[in-house]
Each structure stands twice: as C-alpha cells, then as structure tokens.
Image: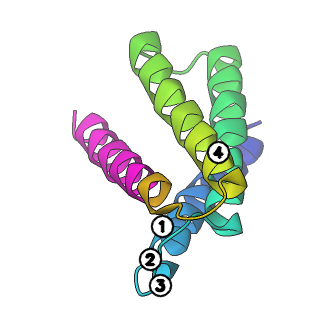
Amino acid sequence: MKVFYEILVVLHVIGVIAIGWGIFSEVRKSPRGVNVAMLHGASLQVLTGILMVGIHDKTGDEPLSHATVGIKLLVALAMLGVVAKGKRAAGDASKYWTVVLVLWLRSEEHTSELQSH
C-alpha cells in the first residue's frame, strides 16, 4: 500500500507540473487561453488527491486535517471548473488563464506553508 501511495504522490506532482507547463506555454501567446495540459493536470490533481486521502485514512499513519483537505479539494475543483469552462469558451479565454494562474500560485503557496509545519 505504501508503494501505491508513493506512486500517487508522484502522479499528483506530475499534475502540478502539467498545470504549470500549460500556464507557461501560454505566456507568449496572444490572447492567452486554456490548453489541454491544464485540463489533464487539474483532473489528475483531483483524482490523485482523493485517492491519497482515502489511502491515508485507511493506513492510519498520522491524522489528517480534514479542514485543510477540504480547502485543497475546493481549490482543485475550482481550478478544474475554470479550466473546463475556459476550454469551451469562444473567443478570448485570457481571463480563465489568469484565474488558473492565481489558483495555481495560491495552491502552491498554501502547500508549501502546510509542509513547513
């Protein structure tokens, strides 16, 4: 079970990298938009995050802060929703790109803060 959990952690990090890659690949484009890397990265983040919480609760290591998990899930679902809406948007999707950038930066800042405690 420990190996499966570690694989999920690696996939979760790959999701973060995919979102970042998608964001930075749009920087030089005009207008900026939402791309497939962001969509797949956000989907991977939600899926692996839910699986990691489920496995962590089953193994009974140290207790999780469910408030923190809930906030992270809310941010991930918001990002997934914005990316999905941005992919379907006709015309200029730069506002969706900006929201994804802010959520991605805020999510990473919050994760770093949690890991330092």
Q: Which amino acid does label 1 sit on?
A: Gly
Indicate the amino acid at tag 3: Lys
Q: Do the residues labelled 4 and 1 touch (CB within 8 Å)?
A: no
| Residue type, numbered disc 4 | Lys
Q: Quadrant of the N terminus?
A: top right
- The residue wearing badge 1 is 20
CA distance for labels 3 and 2: 10 Å
Secondary structure under the numbered disc 1 in the rendered image:
helix
- Does the magenta-highlighted stretch encompass residue 105? yes
Circle 2: element type:
helix
Q: In which quarter of the image is the C terminus?
A: top left
Q: Work out which residue is located at the far front of the displayed protein and give it.
A: 91
Q: Is residue 45 among the parts visible in the rendering?
A: no
Instruction: Please provide percent x and percent y for residue 43.
Output: 70, 46
What residue did someone put label 4 on?
85
Distance between the Cα atoms at labels 2 and 1? 6 Å
For the record, the magenta segment spans 98-117
At x 27%, y 47%, the residue is: 109
